[in-house]
Amino acid sequence: MVTLCQKITGFPHNRVIGQAGVLDSARFAAFIAWELGVSVRDVTAMTLGGHGDDMVPLVRYASVCGIPVMELLERKYGNAAKAKEVMDAMVNRTRKAGGEVVALLKTGSAFYSPASSSIAMVESILKDQKRVLPSCVYLNGEFGVKGYFVGVPTVLGAEGVERIIEFSLNAEEQAMMDKSVAAVKGLVDTLS
């Protein structure tokens, strides 16, 4: 959708921004908060890549007030294996959350979480807040991707996408990112 929007409008790349990263990250944070019995306001969680089954929830960076979520899960369950099992379930649920919401609504589609995500992004741009929000933006070599709109952490301010925050991914995260980017490329190729 973001690629098509940019092609149709001709807007500069920094002004075309998709909101799936904010939406998916909020869902991931909510699942973590529910599991740990804490406020979602204290959870930091982020997803990268495309929207859907191939998104990349970044488990390694998920935290509650700076405390790694995996450490909190290990304390809660008493062992690393159970903590990993619970986290894997949250990652899977995050990837499938859109379908879960649609199934619960029966008619129509998800509307609250996309609207809430869009509001956060628009507010950051209109008020020049410079919030770091995972957004679907045009990449020009960042994260090894060139020429595609992909979800990554961005600084959103008065100029739209003011900068992309690039950081190293470990081997597992990079493999998931590569798979997600391949899925994005496949979708974009159907537009041609």
Image: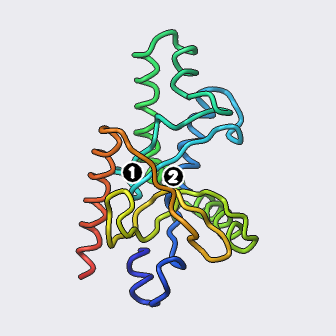
Q: Which mark is residue 111?
A: none
> Which residue is more in the foreground, 3 or 145?
145
Q: In x, y percent, where is residue 63?
A: 59, 34
> Which residue is more in the foreground, 166 or 5?
166
- Give the image quarter of residue 116: bottom right
Q: Which residue in the protein does label 2 denote?
A: 24
Disc 1/disc 2 C-alpha distance (Å): 8 Å
Q: Secondary structure at mark 1?
A: loop
Identity, as a three-letter code, of the amino acid under mark 2: Asp
> Which residue is more in the foreground, 152 or 143?
143
Say whether residue 49 is visible.
yes
Say whether residue 107 is visible.
no
Image quarter where the N terminus lies is bottom left
Q: Which mark is residue 55?
A: 1
Q: In x, y percent, where is residue 37?
A: 67, 27
Image quarter where the C terminus lies is bottom left
Q: Tell me, yes or no, whether the two marked residues, 1 and 2, touch with CB atoms within 8 Å.
A: yes
